[in-house]
Image (cartoon, helix red, strand yellow):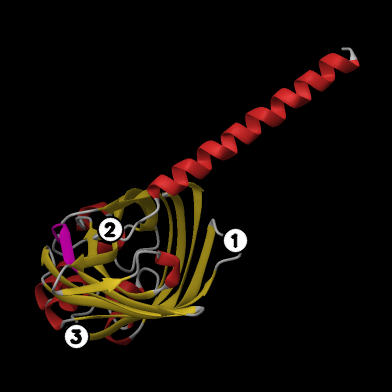
Amino acid sequence: MTKAALGFCLLSLLLAEEARAADLYEEAASARPTADTDLVIELGVGGRLMPEYAGAKDYQFSPYPIVSVDYLSLPGLFSFGSIDPQRGGFSIGPSFEFIDKRNAADYDELQGLRDVDATYEAGVKLGYEWDAAEVYGEFRYAFGGADGFVGDVGANLVARPSQEWQLKAGPTLSFASGKYMNTLFGVSDSESIATGGRLDAYDADGGFRSAGVAASARYEFRPTWFLNADASWNRFIGDAEDSPIVKTGDENQYTVGLGISKRFSLDLF
């Protein structure tokens, strides 16, 4: 290859990269919220490796939704959050969880227990971020297999090493009502007999369920498009820890998740 041809190739590559950078800049500018923006919402989907049931030793893959409301303004009424999510402030959004059906016959350690149908949890997540930290709480109502109230509270240190990266890590604490806890962790007298005495009869009361730590990372690989990764470790405490179901399984529970999401900025009014 001649020097002229090599120079032409390098010039072409530089021009192509400059054009690509210009396109990304225009895309980012067009996607950026404006003063007319009334709603900033993020939607996506992911998958998570998690225990097969509460207290299980084995793990399964389960899908999960990504939904968050970063900013909402109702003219003349109120507004919360920030048009720029990196500025922090108050945030609110929906909170969902899904617990798959527990078929006792599928697990040797649960033989004799009743089955628990799939459980659906829906509620709200509240958070407040300032400087390099945040606090949050999630409160949900569960129905289906296990009924009752359940929730999580936690705090995170927040780091943004670049415009594209956001890192979070901190402690978490979960709790649940008595009916919910007893469905997942309790063993009735008849069930104890059906297990041949392997599992003692046990009534689980409401209260704190687990404590642990969670971490997450997100990368904006294109304007308003994000890769999301998270991991957590939780250890059962209180009546959940003392459950015969947990004692035959594992009191330490781990999750690892990966997902993709997109942020939308909408002018509603």
What residue type is disc 3 on? Answer: Gly
Query: Where is the C terminus found, in terms of image quarters?
Result: bottom left
Closer mark to the observer between disc 1 and disc 2: 2
Q: Quadrant of residue 125?
A: bottom left
Which residue matches tag 1?
Answer: 162
What residue type is disc 1 on? Answer: Ser
Query: Where is the N terminus found, in terms of image quarters?
Result: top right
Q: Which residue is drawn at 33% across and 48% down?
A: 45
The answer to whether residue 123 shows anywhere in this view is yes
Which numbered disc covers residue 37? Answer: 2
- Which element type, helix, strand or loop, lies under badge 3? loop
Q: Residue at x 34, y 57 (%)?
A: 34
Segment tinted magenta in the rendering: 116-123
What residue type is disc 2 on? Answer: Thr
Q: Is 118 in the magenta?
A: yes
Q: Is 21 in the magenta?
A: no
Closer mark to the observer between disc 3 and disc 2: 2
